[in-house]
Image (cartoon, rainbow, N blue to C red):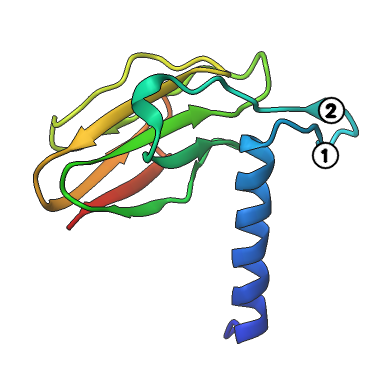
């Protein structure tokens, strides 16, 4: 089955909406009808960082590109009570501590390359950072 251009655009828009809801100071109604928010105070080293949300047992977006010297900040936007996650390099470049819902981790990338990573607790959660 082929995916039409309209479906790809719809998926891209849906991803942006999910990510925006995570970073918003406003509440978003979850699938259960409850209210969930993800408004994290970002520390001083996060300004200019590329943001990756952890939500629904996935990294959103799954693939990010940064310039050498840039950083990526992962924000655990899961609802309270959800198990903690990590962001763990497949190449032993970084390994975050366990990130409970509402916690964040920042990694600076000084070397160009492609860096696949997983959540060590949930190895089905995979993504990639590409440093140019």
| Residue 59 locus on image (x, y percent) | 47, 42
Which quadrant of the view contains residue 77?
Answer: top right
Q: Residues within 10 Å of mark 2 (few under 14, many from 20)?
A: few
For mark 2, what is the residue?
A: 35
What is the residue that sits farthest to the right in this orientation? 33
Q: Is residue 115 left or right of residue 47?
A: left
What quarter of the picture does the C terminus occupy?
Answer: bottom left
* Residue 23 vs residue 62, the one in the foreground: 23
Q: CA distance from mark 2 to mark 1?
A: 9 Å
- Residue drawn at 33 percent across, 38 percent down: 72
For mark 1, what is the residue?
A: 31
Give the secondary structure at mark 1: loop
| Residue 36 locus on image (x, y percent) | 77, 27
- Residue drawn at 33 percent across, 27 percent down: 106
Q: Is residue 78 left or right of residue 67?
A: right
- Residue drawn at 66 percent across, 13 percent down: 81
* Residue 40 vs residue 100, the one in the foreground: 40
* Residue 8 vs residue 28, the one in the foreground: 28
| Residue 7 locus on image (x, y percent) | 66, 77
| Residue 38 locus on image (x, y percent) | 65, 28
- Give the label, 2 or 1, closer to the camera: 2
């Amino acid at each position: 089955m082929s995916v039409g251009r309209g479906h790809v655009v719809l998926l891209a828009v849906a991803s942006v909406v999910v990510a925006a809801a995570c970073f918003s100071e406003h509440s978003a109604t979850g699938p259960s009808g409850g209210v969930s928010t993800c408004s994290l105070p970002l520390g001083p080293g996060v300004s200019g960082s590329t943001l990756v949300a952890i939500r629904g047992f996935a990294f959103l977006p799954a693939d990010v590109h940064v310039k050498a010297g840039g950083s990526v900040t992962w924000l655990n936007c899961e609802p309270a009570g959800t198990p903690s996650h990590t962001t763990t390099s497949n190449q032993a470049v970084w390994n975050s501590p366990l990130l409970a819902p509402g916690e964040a981790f920042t990694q600076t990338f000084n070397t160009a390359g492609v860096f696949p990573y997983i959540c060590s607790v949930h190895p089905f959660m995979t993504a990639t950072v590409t440093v140019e």
